[in-house]
Image: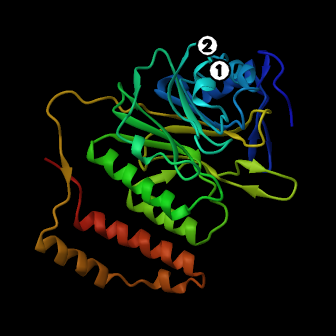
């Protein structure tokens, strides 16, 4: 794995095994910036499982100094420091806005640094959700963009369904506040290997109108590939840029995601809801009855059949019970 050496040699982008491997040169960063016009995409997030921030600070600072990527939010997994230790880790032009530090064991943790030109604050609503190993959450509000950003680490040995219950509570509360949502983290659920846990997680994300925009492996060894590091956003057709990058200082690949900033709306607050009238319910029943379901029944793989069913169900659900402004 290549090493970060100097500002003029921070990213060299190559393709191998479907991964954009990176050691950032100025020329290549200019290419990323030009092809996506990233400055016009207000939120530019770098998410990375660094496996100790203490001995990676110089490399991280170097990456952030490459202004052609214009990173303004830094989400880090497994910083491995106590609260007192993390407080004295300074990153130029960035503020430590939120952090989770374990109290019962070592390793793990999460934190969020934000460029000092971006207005943000820690969100205290979710302090009671934090739990060592299960739900190690850092969460901030991006004040200009009406957006909540939550960074969550889950250890492999923890109770997955405890994690899922906490995730549901988090999402429901954020939606009740009328905020846009961005989730990132290392959840130790391999999105490349379908099983019951992944199926339950994907079903929940689908019902919440959320998608994971990371589609290629985030950790590669000589004998395996996995995708456990995620960036999950509201499912929309808004322009975005997604890159998976090898920074050279961790065995996890980083995720660089740029997206449109959701500007805060001024004026009267709008309330969104669905109308579950008898007429709408009868219409939904008719749509489900009228569907032939042939594609669902053709698949020999139960998981594929289930996902086809859920996609059809959600499609008709949104037709019969559309979200309306009040």
Circle 2 is placed at which residue position? 92
Q: CA distance from mark 1 to mark 2?
A: 9 Å
Q: Is residue 275 positioned above or below 6 on the image?
A: below
Q: Is residue 85 above or below residue 247?
A: above
Q: Which residue is mark 1?
A: 64
Task: For label 1, count other residues whose C-alpha is less than 10 Å away and answer few (under 14), some (14-19) or many (20+).
Answer: many
Marks 1,2: beta carbons within 8 A: yes
Q: Residue 103, image x and y in percent? A: 58, 40
Quarter residue 284 falls in: bottom left
Is 295 positioned to the left or the right of 242 in the image?
Answer: left
Other residues around mark 2 within 10 Å, as few (<14) / some (14–19) / many (≥20): few
SS type, badge 1: helix
Q: Is residue 14 left or right of residue 257?
A: right
Q: Residue at horizontal 60%, vertical 58%? A: 158
Q: Which mark is residue 272?
A: none
Of the two numbered discs 1 and 2 on the same chain, state the one appearing first in sequence: 1
Residue nearest the viewer, comparing 2 with 235:
2
Q: Toward which corner of the image does residue 61 lie, by quadrant?
A: top right
Closer-to-camera residue (121/257):
121
């Amino acid at each position: 794995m290549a090493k970060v050496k100097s500002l003029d040699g921070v990213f060299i982008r190559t393709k191998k095994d479907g991964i954009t491997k990176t050691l950032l040169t100025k020329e290549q960063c200019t290419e990323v910036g030009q092809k996506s016009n990233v400055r016009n995409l207000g939120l530019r997030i770098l998410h990375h499982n660094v496996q100790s921030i203490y001995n990676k600070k110089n490399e991280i600072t170097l990456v952030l100094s490459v202004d052609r990527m214009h990173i303004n939010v830094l989400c880090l997994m497994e910083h491995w420091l106590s609260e007192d230790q993390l407080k004295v880790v300074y990153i130029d032009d960035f503020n430590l806005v939120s952090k989770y530090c374990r109290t019962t064991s070592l390793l793990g943790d999460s934190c969020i640094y934000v460029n000092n030109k971006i207005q943000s604050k820690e969100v205290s609503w979710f302090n009671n959700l934090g739990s060592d190993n299960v739900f190690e959450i850092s969460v901030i509000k991006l004040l200009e963009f009406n957006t909540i950003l939550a960074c969550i680490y889950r250890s492999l040995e923890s109770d997955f369904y405890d994690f899922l219950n906490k995730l549901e509570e988090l999402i429901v509360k954020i939606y009740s506040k009328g905020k846009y949502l961005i989730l990132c983290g290392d959840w130790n659920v391999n999105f490349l290997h379908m099983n019951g846990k992944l199926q339950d997680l994907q079903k929940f994300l689908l019902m919440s109108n959320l998608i994971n925009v990371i589609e290629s492996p985030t950790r590669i060894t000589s004998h395996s590939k996995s995708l456990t590091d995620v960036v999950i956003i509201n499912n929309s057709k808004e322009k975005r840029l997604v890159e998976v990058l090898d920074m050279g200082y961790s065995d996890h690949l980083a995720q660089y995601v740029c997206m449109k900033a959701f500007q805060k709306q001024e004026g009267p607050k709008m309330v969104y809801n669905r109308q579950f009238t008898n007429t709408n319910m009868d219409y939904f029943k008719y749509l489900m009855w009228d569907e032939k379901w042939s594609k669902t029944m053709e698949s020999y793989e139960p998981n594929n059949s289930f996902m086809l069913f859920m996609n059809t169900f959600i499609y008709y659900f949104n037709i019969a019970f559309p979200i309306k402004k009040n």
